[in-house]
Image: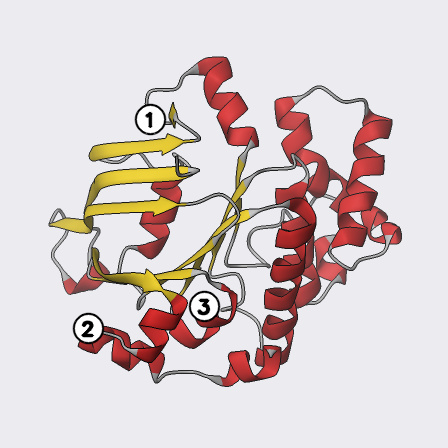
Amino acid sequence: MPLMQAEHLTKTFASNENIFGTAPGTRIRAVKDVSLTIEAGETVGLVGESGSGKSTLGRMLLRLIEPDSGSVRFDGHDVLAARGSELRRLRRDMQIIFQDPYGSLDSRMKVEQIVCEPIAIHGGESSGSRRTRAAEMLQAVGLDESALRRYPHEFSGGQRQRIGIARALMLRPRFMVADEPVSALDVSVGAQIVNLLRQLQKEFQLTYLFISHSLPVVRYLATRIAVMKQGELVELGTTDQIVSSPHHDYTRTLLAATPELVTAAS
């Protein structure tokens, strides 16, 4: 049984003025009948240009966005039907790393509050226990315990992304959506974050959906690669298959683009 299984997911939004070059009120189908399975322990790379529906799909898997139709099952449990305590239990196992290391951290909160926020929401641990675990998670992502007493503005973009990763790890999840986690960082810092994610996967036995606009970035980390274009899944295969013999012209275009991070990370 796959750890994550999505079938026939569809999501349509009403556009705002000037978004996607359409008139306000126009219906935009962001995700079109997409099915995807992710096995425990693997990394599926989800690639495509901006506006292809990648982030919408990732958020639907976590039920941060409700699909119009389709189904999502996590470890055999119906995510979309879950309510109350069952949904909270599922969400402990499913976390997200956001794209923007600046906007995703509350500037008014100290790092300790930020990293401990998931446990504060879900409850079940004393403040002392939370702090101890927060220090452990910071060390796991390469930051010192002293960071707990500081504010986000005191850190670089790469360090802020490490804080966001530590926050996502606090509940010891099994599945993570990494939503363009290196796109806001320069090449060398982004390579460090990619290597960190690979290390953490082994240490914490994580399963990833790694979202990126760059296929060369994804091929360094992913077990399999899924390619999205205009809301549709146009190609899916093992990393070796996609890299060595892509079938879709769009995949070939992505494969030729932005190789720098892969070079820096390898």
The quarter of the image holding the N terminus is top left
Q: Which residue is mark 3?
A: 218
Q: Is residue 196 left or right of residue 54?
A: right
Tell me the number on the disc at residue 248.
Answer: 2
Q: Quadrant of residue 190?
A: bottom right
Q: Residue at x 85, y 47 (%)?
A: 149
Mark 3 to mark 2: distance in Å? 17 Å
Q: Position of residue 22 (x, y in %)?
A: 13, 59
Q: Badges 2 and 1: C-beta atoms under 8 Å apart?
A: no
Q: Secondary structure at mark 2?
A: loop
The relative height of residue 2 versus residue 180 in the rendered view (above or below) is: above
Mark 1 element type: loop
Dot 3 or dot 2, earlier in sequence:
3
User: Crowding at label 1, few (<14), some or many (≥20) Cα neighbours within 10 Å?
Assistant: some
- Name the residue located 39 percent from the left edge and 71 percent from the top edge: 240
Circle 2 packing at 10 Å, graded few (<14), some (14-19), many (20+), is few
The label shown at residue 80 is: 1
Estimate the x, y position of residue 207 in percent, counting from the top left.
Answer: 52, 47
Tell me, yes or no, whether the two marked residues, 3 and 1, touch with CB atoms within 8 Å: no
The amino acid type of the residue labelled 1 equals Leu
Q: Is residue 143 above or below residue 116?
A: below
